[in-house]
Each structure stands twice: as structure tokens, then as C-alpha cells.
Image (cartoon, rainbow, N blue to C red):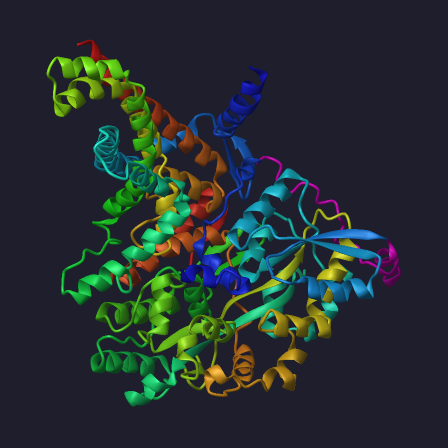
Amino acid sequence: MVLFLLMFLTPLGYAAYLSLFQERLIGGTAFVGLDNYVTALKDPLLREGVVRVGAFFVIQVPLMLLMALLFALALDSGLLRLARVIRLGIFVPYAVPSVVATLMWGYLYGPDFGPFAQLGEKFDLPVPHFLSDGWMLSSLANVVTWEFVGYNMIILYAALRTVPQELYEAAAMDGAGPWRIAWSIKLPALRPALLLTLLFSVIGSFQLFNEPKLLQDIAPDVIDSSYTANLYAYSLAFTGQQVNYAAAVSFLLGLVIVIFSYVVLFTANRRRTS
Amino acid sequence: MNRASFTPNTSQMSRRLFLTAAGAVSLGAALTGCGGSGGSASTAKSVTPADIDKAMKTPTELTFWTWVPDIEQEIALFEKKYPAIKVKVVNAGQGVEHYTKLRTAIKAGKGAPDVAQMEYQAIPTFTITDSLLDLSPYGASELKDTFVDWTWGQVSGPKGEIWAIPQDTGPMGMLYRADIFDKHGIEPPKTWDDFAAAARKLHKADPDVYLTNLAANEAAAWHGLLWQAGAKPYATSGKGNVSINVNDAISKKLAAYWGGLAQEGVIGVEPDFTDAWFSALNKGKYATWITAAWGPVFLSGSAKSTAGKWRAAPLPQWDAAKPSSGNWGGSTSAVIKATENPIAAAVFAQFLNSDPESAKLFSTKQSFFPATKPLLTDPSFAGDASAFYGGQKVNQLFAEIGETVSTEFQWPPFLDQAVTDWTETVGTSLARKKDTVAALDAWQTRLTTYAKKQGFSVQAP
């Protein structure tokens, strides 16, 4: 308990304390109460950042979880050859640090000398400009999906392995085929695990940082310093030396995540009881 | 990947890192509220030779934060001369990462080094918080004539303070592909007008080739070009007064020029130091690289396949009768004000960069472009003929260019913000082929707003 207070609440409390002040390069530090929060609530850059990661969540998460689910079901069905190799293969990207993964994808996306662009040129096919304004969010979604499909698949697959064998046998006795078993037994058994992956994804999406930060180097005109809410807080603190305002922005972002997570949990639970 | 290939080449990295503007971690920077602590070292009273003599014979350990690789060789020279002093080298990251950690340690009041690597443009961001030791009472004033004039302007304060000792420099010039120029009958342009004409001619003759690439993420190059054009975008008078003029007439001339070429599509505007950019240099997509004195060595390492095809020339000029250039990159050694060993630290910073043997070692081992006059005229340095540049004496050329760099240029006390705002206004306008002149006004507005928010009183242009 003491450890919890020390490790968890102290930094949080300190950040909350910081967010009530304003330190300036000239003139020092002054207590400003909730001013930073008022400014942040009216800050269009923060709002755009949050909306953008919200859109990212809507595009990326369903796709990723659906893929993870399909892979998990396919592996669990026992019908795949080389299941171990496939399982490992899908999981390996998760073991690649996100920094490395982003650098690699950034190279693949390259408009001049990237492999996709080169192939397109060779076969005279139109290749989208992955790093342009219109494509960037999808390109980011692709990187994140590539990184995390395996991770989510492992969670779902592990949940599937805990389903008692008797249930399958009983279902088979009742004449259920593989599809029926997947729908009526496996999916309901997966519900808690799916909810868990969904929650992780909410947090991951709203805290999107590494991938845009790195792609900023190769697409500086598309990803600005407030592209995602987290990137914005970072730029405020370390580029603008506005640590106090950054603390307030971080707290508001945390609040958004809590609310969103709660909404997800609430909807899921209500559906279960209805 | 190529990216890895320039990581070891750290000094060049740092020059560009100034642009990345964000880059660093250390949440400890949140430790605010006690700015400028520990500034007890006296600056006013002058230090006698006897004091220095005594301090240099007292066993002392100095901590030195630097990202320069293999700097132990230069330090060994110092320790040989002053056996009582030991120097501990700490690599706290590079560029922005280094500065963020340094700011944090200074604010926390402990853990800061005695001496730190510091790029020219970062100096005002540390003097505004009163974090650097004035080296003039420690004999630094006598070094004025040793160093290239503009470098001394960069490290000097308004009241004759000396905030740092120059280590290396980056006067700007132009590297060009002689083979591409010959093929299309282009002479190395002497003026920016010639340069624009050549850009149009070359791209028309070969649509796959551009005369140059003005990187839309490279605020440092832009500032160097502003410097060449004679602009004075920033000036600080007194502690809280700053004037911001990033959209004055000279800046607008520059913006109309480059923005126009970008809109015509006759130059490239892609980000530099990326994989695509390295490929482009290797494959001859760009016929010139507008760069600095550290560029020649850097290029010979990263575009090996084009060896022998490159030549160097001064920047094209706005007024051919009055040649001038700007600076991009280079760095200094600064002493942190809170040091407990001001004398030893100050002597170390001076020795490291002004001792002839140590300075020469920087030019041979680290391939730094020198900041000291004796070395720049030393035949063993200036006479060096590089095969990558067809035997041209590139060092000598850049040494001559260095003499045309104005001593007046100043940096703002909030450089990182200026760089980020540049990228999001001017840089973006170049990349998207929008109105670059209008983008200057947006840059000016953003910076003014920021400066006011930080408590500065901002002079109207």
C-alpha cells in the first residue's frame, strides 16, 4: 500500500500540483488555479488532437481486433498446418520495438525509393502516397495493427485454450458444426478477453505517440507538433518549456481516456444483461 | 538502413538535431519552480594568475557532458598538462536530448556537469536562465584573436561576457555535381539569380533531376540563408526584451525566392537526413547540396558511390560584389554557472578548444571544421586535397568562406519554439507549394504570441 502511494500517487499528485501553476521564462512562477485547464478546454489544437486519435481508434481498433480474433479462432480450430510457426510469425512483430517497426514502415512508405513506390513504377501501377495528409492516419493504423495483432491474438488464443474440452464434445453430440461451435461457444467464452483487448486499445489509441513522432521526421508537413494529443503535451513541455500547461493537457487527456474506457465497459456490460 | 550509417557521425547529427526540435525525454524536466539555483560563483571579481595556478594544482574532478565521439584523446592532452585535474566524460545524448537533461539538472540544483557541449544557437536559451558562467574573468578575453570573428560574436554577451569557447563551425557553401553541370552546360552559379535560372534549365532538360533540395524540415539551413542575406530575425536587449523580425523585407525576399522555386517545381523540398534523401544524393536526383563546412566530409561518407563527381563552391550571392555567407552547425564548450570548480572548468574549456594541439586533433580525428584562425591557415589543414572532390582543396575554400560570415547574427532565447513554428509555417508552405511569404507572417505571429506568453516584452519590428 505504501509502495502504491509512493510509486503511483506521488507522481500523479505532483503533476496535478504542477498543473495549477504557470512558470514563464521571464517573471518566474505564479499560482494560476485552474487557468491552465480553462485554456486547454478552449485549445483548438488539443481538441483536434483528441478528435484525430478518436478517428484513429474507430478505423484501426475494430480491424485489428477482428484480425486477431480470426487468427485466434483459426489457430484454435486445430485445422491449420504449421500452427506453431504461424502463431509465432504473427506474434513476432510485437517483439519488434515500436521505434524500429515505425522506422521500417517509414522506409517502406517512401514516395521515391520505397519498395512499394518502386514496384508501382515497375509495373506501372498507381501507388498511393502513404505519407500524405489523406493517407497518414491509415498508414499509422497499418503500422500499429502490424505491431499489435499478434499481441491481441495471443490474449484471445489463451482465453480459448481455457474453454473446457467437454463443452465442445457436448456441442458435437448435439450436432453442432465447427461454425456453430465458434459462434455459440467460443465467442461467448471470449467476451472478457475481448473486452480486455478493447480497453488496452482505447488507451493505446488515445496515447498514440511513438509512431507519429518518428514519421514526423519524414513527413514534417503532415504531422505537426499537435498531431496527436500526447504529442502535443510532449511538445508543450519540451519544445515550448510550458511544463505546467503540458501537465494540465495530460490530465485532461487522462480524463478523456477514463471516460471513454468507462463508456466501452458500460456498453459491453449492458449488452450482456439485456 | 541508412539511418544507422550516420549515427556514429555524431557531430553532423547534432547539427541537424537542432532542427528536430523535440527529441528528448526525461520527465524530470517537470521539476520546475527553482530556476537558476546555485548561481553562487562570482562573476564580477577577476581571478588572479595565482588563483588559477593554485586551482590547477588542486586535485579536482570535472564532469563534462558531450556527445563528441573519442573526445578522450583531446582530454588526455589536458590531463597531461594539468595532472591534478581529472575529467569525467558523460554522454547525455545529443542535441535536444542533451539540452533537456541539462536544463533539468540545472533546475534541480544538482547533477549538472561542470562543462557542457553547446551549439551556438543553444547558448541564449541557457543565458536567459542565467545558467552559464561568464568566462571573461578567467582569461577567456585574451583568446578573442585566436578565434574566427563571427564565432566570437556568437559566444559574446552584450556586456562583454564570454559564455562559451568555440569548438567547431559550419560556414555555408555549395557542393555540386560537376558531371551533371557539365552534361547540361551549367556553370556553378555565382548569384542567386543565376542559380534560379540554372534550376529551371536543369529540370527542363532532365525532369528527374533537380538543381537542389531545400529541406522543408531544415530550419537550421533557413537560418543560415537568412544569415547570409543579412537578416536580423532576433535581437535580445536586456533580459526581458526581445525583438522578433522573421518577416522583414530581407526574409520576404528569401521566402519569395525559395517559395517561388518550390511552386515552380524546379527544386526538391523533401526532408533531409532521411533514407529517401540519402538515396536521392547517391542516385543523382539533386545536382547540389547547399550545406556547411562539415558537409564535405559527411557527404563523402554517405554518398560513396558518387566519389570524384562532386566539387565545392561558395554559396550563390545576393550581391556578387559583397560575398557573404551564414553558418549552419558547429558547437562550443560552456561552463555551467553552478560549478564548484569554476577555475578548473574555465581553464579546461579554453584549453580544449584553443590549445593548438588539441584543436588540430579535433580537425583530424573528429573531422571538425576548425574555429581557430591559426589552424584554418595551417597548410596541413588548408592544403588537404580530397579525392572525393576531384582533388579540390575544399578546406581552404570553406576557410575563405568563413571570413565572409557576418558577426552580427543572433539567436532567440526560445530557439526550439522558433524551429517548431518555422517547420509548421514556412517549412509546410514549401512542402505544399503554398505562399511562403504569407507563411512568414504566420511564423512571426506565432513567435510573438509565444514570447509574450513567456513574459517577454516584444518590440514591434
Residue A228 in the figure: left or right of residue B75:
left
Q: In front: B280, or B454?
A: B280
- At horizontal 36% and vertical 66% (from top left) the residue drawn is B277
Q: Main secondary structure of the magenta part?
A: loop
Quarter of the image where one finds residue A198: top left
State which quarter of the image contains the N terminus of chain A.
top right
Check residue B49 for magenta coloring.
yes
Q: Is residue B139 visible?
A: no
Q: Position of residue A94 (x, y in %)?
A: 37, 40
- At horizontal 60% and vertical 47% (from top left) the residue drawn is B102
- At horizontal 21% and vertical 33% (from top left) the residue drawn is A79
Q: Position of residue A243 (x, y in %)?
A: 49, 37
- At horizontal 64% and vertical 84% (from top left) the residue drawn is B380
Q: In front: A26, or B185?
A: B185
Instruction: Give the answer, above or below, for where A177 lies relative to A104.
Output: above
Residue stretch in magenta: B32-58
Residue A214 in the figure: left or right of residue A54:
right
Q: In front: B141, or A106?
A: A106
The image shows a total of numbered marks equal to 0
Residue A64 in the figure: left or right of residue B309:
left
Q: Position of residue A131 (x, y in %)?
A: 26, 54
Extreme residue in the top direction: A273
Q: In front: B18, or B278?
A: B278
Check residue B425 for magenta coloring.
no
Q: Position of residue A104 (x, y in %)?
A: 35, 53
State which quarter of the image contains the C terminus of chain A.
top left
Instruction: Give the answer, above or below, for where B373 lies relative to A274.
Output: below
Q: Is residue A153 visible?
A: yes
